[in-house]
Image: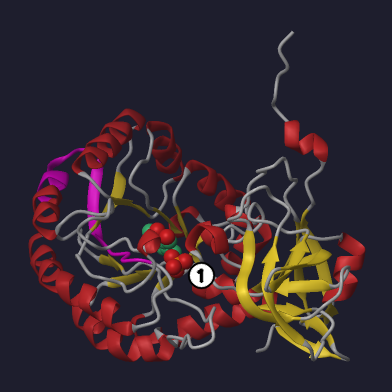
Amino acid sequence: MQAFTYRNQTLHVEDVSVADLAETHGTPLYVYSRNYFLRQLTELRQAFAAVDPLICYSVKANSNLSVIKTFAGAGAGVDIVSGGELFRARRAGVDASKIVFAGVGKTHSEIEAALREDIRFFTVESEGEVERISECAVRLGTVGRIAFRVNPDVDPQTHRYISTGKQENKFGMDPARVRQAFKRAAELPGVEPVGLHLHIGSQILNADPFVEAIHKVTPLCHELREQYDTFKTLDIGGGIGIVYEPGDQQLKPATLAERLLPLLQELDLQIVMEPGRYLAGEGGILVTRVQYVKDSYRKKFFVVDAAMNDLLRPSFYQAYHPIVAVRETGETVMGDVVGPICESGDFLAQDRTLPDVPADALLAVHCAGAYGFTMASNYNSRPRPAEILVDGNNARVIRERENLDDLIRGEKMED
Ligand SMILES: Cc1ncc(COP(=O)(O)O)c(C=O)c1O
């Protein structure tokens, strides 16, 4: 399914004109394709059908209630990393038995909230966390299920900020420690150790690191399975990448499954997956209007009304996002797309061949469905954009544009 196509030289999301959406709702504007999201979920589910995985959509990728509900409505669970994401997931109607809770720094109150909801399991990253969950559970008269996050020391071949499974990363525990911690957990009154968890990084376009990571935990899985009746689950995390740049090759779920299924089937465990970017990334765009076109030395600057506060990835990770004109134009030029924020790092594209559009034209920044709005801020006191979810020819506002009062909500002025 193509989420974004040109009809009469105008970009459409499903059956809705992006130009019309910008006219009605203003810019900058996030626009998502509901059917694209669902298509991605189906593709992944079908590829891994042989192990019937529980697919837990990683809420951090795009945490809008309607987006969570879209995936949950299609049978997915969710992967959360905070009390806030737990709140969102429950509000969106996600069944608590399909919620898994990751993260290195869970607080008492976050743990207690998740215990009260009786979530599927916590993925735990340290001995201290296990003790804390047990204490909280005993206090509440319950038991928390836990899966140990293993740091397999595998290079996921991605940006260093989104690599999470190497020795130097803060995530997970080395296998020897997990073995010890599992033993201790089995003795504690407030936790039940039910499995292992892996998440080696994000935006991974090669099956090899996934294979290597699973190979590394396989002996531990066999060992724990023999020793503990409670050990039933392997959560293989998220991390499947998408095509941002020319030259990127999609790691197709079928290709990944071909490599992983023989390893997973042999384990005979309940498999959980936590994809975020793969499900949501390519199903979203950020629409922005050119304010000024400025010639400088050797290139053009397209100054637009979206900025690093709206889409942080280019500034933060030097990430490439394809940028196209909403109304097709044949002309191209070398230049930068920059926002109005007072930082030279405020760009959406740098030194690129871009559509040569005039001031007032609309541009669409692709691959903005994941880690787009969720990483947006109010930097420079800029209200955050609205979000629209398109389903066929129906477009719904799923988040209002922030207004100036939103910017100062909760602030107090000194006398
Ligand atoms: C524990 C965990 N699971 C899943 C994900 C989702 O990763 P991705 O969006 O690359 O699939 C992340 C992302 O950082 C994560 O930390």
The answer to whether residue 410 is above or below residue 48 is above
Q: Is residue 377 magenta?
A: no
- List x then y, in percent, for residue 249: 46, 88
Q: Is residue 312 above or below residue 186?
A: below
Residue at the limit of the structure toward the top, as seen here: 415
Please give left or right for residue 321 compared with residue 395 in the image: left
Secondary structure found at label 1: helix
Q: Residue at x 77, y 62 (%)?
A: 304
Is 193 a magenta residue? yes
In the displayed structure, 129 sits above or below 247; it is: above
The quadrant where residue 414 appears: top right
Q: How is the image coloured?
A: secondary structure
Which stretch is magenta?
Answer: 183-201
Q: Is mark 1 within 8 Å of ligand 1?
A: yes
Q: Residue sitting at 24 percent across and 49 percent down? A: 192
Front-lying residue, 211 or 403: 403
Residue 383 visible in the current orientation? yes
Image quadrant for the C terminus?
Answer: top right
The residue at 70%/24% (across/down) is 411
Ligand 1 falls in quadrant: bottom left
Residue 265: name its quadrant: bottom left
Q: Tell me which amino acid carries mark 1.
A: Arg
Residue 333 on image: x %, y % = 72, 82
The quarter in which the N terminus is drawn is bottom right
Residue 143, by quadrant, is top left
Q: Which residue is mark 1?
A: 277
Asked whether, in this view, residue 251 is left or right of residue 143, the answer is right
Horizontally, residue 369 falls left or right of residue 262, namely right
Residue 113 location, x and y as percent? 45, 38
Label 1 neighbour load within 10 Å: few <14, some 14-19, many 20+ = many
The foreground one among 351 and 317 is: 351
Any part of residue 388 in sight: no
